Image: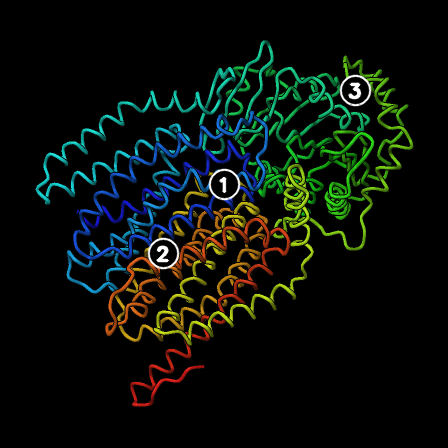
Amino acid sequence: MLSAALALIGFAAVLAQTVFLREFLVVFQGNEITIGLALAAWLAWTALGSAWAGRAPATDAVRRLIAFEILSGLSLPVTVFAIRSLRAVLRVVPGESLSPTLSLVAALATLSLFCTLSGALFATGIRAWSGEHSTAVSVAGGKVYLLEAVGALAGGFVTGLWLVGRFDSMTVAVIGAGLNLLTAAALLVPQRRLVSAGLAAVLAVGLFAAAPTLVRTSLGQLWRGWPVVATENSPYANLAVVAQGDARTLYENGLAAASAEDAASAEDAVHFALLQHAEPKSLLLIGGAAGGAIREALKHPSLERVDCVELDPAVLRLAARYFDFPHHERVVMHAADARLWLRNTPQKFDVIIVDLPDPQTAQLNRFYTLEFFREAARHLTATGVFSFRLAGGENYISPRRAAFLRSINKTLRQAFLQVMTYPGASMHFFAANRRAPLVADPRTLIARLKARRLETQYVSEFDIPFRLAEDRVLQLGLAIRPQGSTPVNRDFTPLAYYYNAILWSAQFHDRAAEMLERLAGVPFTTLAGAVAAAMFLIVLAAARCRGAHRGVASCAVASMGFTMMGLELLVLLGYQAVYGVVYKQLAVVVGAFMGGMALGSWRALKTEKAPTLSLAWIGWIAVVSAVALVAAMTALSRAGNALGAFLGSQILFPALAALSGVLGGWQFPVASRVYFAPADAPGDAGALYAWDLMGACVGALSIGAWLIPVYGFLKTAALIAIIDLPPAVLACWWARCGLKAACGVPRTTP
């Protein structure tokens, strides 16, 4: 039963992380920076909990484990309720963003209880296993790490493939809490505490019964003061429909995605692009299913077919039920990732319109990269037009926004022969590969508007001349003209969402935006040199400290924590860039990663000889791992046919994820044997795990939100290698010293 309880640590951690991050998406309107802040808070509290509980005495470890299981289980729904109450506490209305500082404070406050207990469970589990099986702490640490990885593997698959998307987050949290309480009850029976076991079981049943009430109450906190008519928890997002009078708004992860009464936005989304074409017969609309864009597009009499691709089937269901959603024989709906759908369809279109928000996240950024623009260009007819909108400005574009728009402009020009922009608060980009020029003359647009007898309120013969006033068009063109240093936005260098993070930060404090700009301006060679020097100083200090073997193990584990976070983010963002958000497949990728960790831990426990030498070999493998991973993903991204895409998404990418996980799972038991050397006192049972988590915490803060978008996948991988190199050298030196000592030569200090 103890093994099951320890596996539940990993199961509950993955379940909780999935649920909490989904809820943070709603409150924070989560971009990569806010998610990185939440992950960093998670890892920091877990590390603190592990270090704190690891100092407890070895006696009564099982009883402490039971207590932590109960408290951890109860804290799951409490944390969900706390996150959903953030809006009310902070007085934030739906659609309003939180500053980076406030986001970090909120994450630290709400995650403190559960994550501290989660870390305490791991350290206490080591003590409990060591006492129950009469094994050394070094061996117990590896066993618990293996069991946690197995539980995380199961938690990833169960939560990702079954619970999320079927149940509300509060219900999922209650399920996790119930499992913890029932496990605690089972552990209490051998302790002859039958009354306590019965109370824990009754409490679990009571939580299950109270789940519907907890869901209603917590949702009431999340949408306090807002009349919600429908909510749905899909695999892709938390969705809510809010009604105010006759107006209805669809919120997707807390962000207003569509409004039933926003005729101005619906007209703006499609008419300018369709008027660019002399006689459009086929239209591909990416996004915009619930916002009235389809209704407006059908006003063009020449259109014979409209294909609309929307990622989330739940959006289509809610749009059909609560919005003015046209059911027409000319409209074909596709519930799919638009990039995957476009890659696999043989169709070509007269007009392709991307009706999605600005690239505020890595997921949205995929529709503004050079690779996607080239894919769109291949699916245009000879006279076809490609179009999308971005936030601009009626009369002024700030330097920061201009830098972002220049990057998109330059990227678009590398995929199309012609590019043209219309100014406005909603700025339009048009692109084509035809010889005939794109239409810039307002008289031509007005003539087509009248010829098609379009009944419009906002895109009209009065608005078009103002929109295309010569001075406004010239001013915009000068502001966003690409410069020599302007970067190109690509799948594996997703710089556009970093620009958006700067714009987001500037809303709250100019200093935060300035800091992000400075980080973006750091030359890679300067950063790499500084990191290399700092790492070598750290490992030198670790080698000279008292108990140098612990310094060796701690450095290796901390750098591996950073590397594992980096490998996981590279795999997930790489998979997303190449194959899109195919949810079940992503769950398989995450599950494969955890399965690799379990396999690595199992293999390490089978090898008991020369742990310092094994630690050195693992360090050198880590040095090359990230670069090898990026090279493999780059090769997979070039597989253009359906068979290559199937093999890559279903087999090869999960295999890469599993191999990445093996590395971290293999190292921890080996490092544990080095850290808890037989000649020394067992010491702090949770310290090594805390170092692992702190390394991952630094990775969560820096890799997804800064290194990958600014420097790209390959340079980020090179930086990971630079971080892993000094600990690998240190482990080699320590292994060499160990061999000399075995031959009677005293150890030396570098």
Quarter of image, res 362: top right
- Which amino acid type corresponds to the residue marked 2 in the rendered image? Met
Label 2, secondary structure: give it: helix
Q: Residue at x 36, y 75 (%)?
A: 613
Q: Residue at x 36, y 56 (%)?
A: 597
Badge 2: how crowded within 10 Å, few (<14), some, or many (20+)? many
Residue 375 appears in the rendering = no
Q: Residue at x 31, y 65 (%)?
A: 672
Residue 300 at x, y = what percent? 74, 19
Residue 105 badge:
1
The outermost residue toward the bottom is 744
- Which amino acid type corresponds to the residue marked 1 in the rendered image? Val
* Residue that badge 3 annotates: 459
Badge 1: how crowded within 10 Å, few (<14), some, or many (20+)? some
Label 1, secondary structure: give it: helix
Mark closer to the chain start, 2 or 1: 1
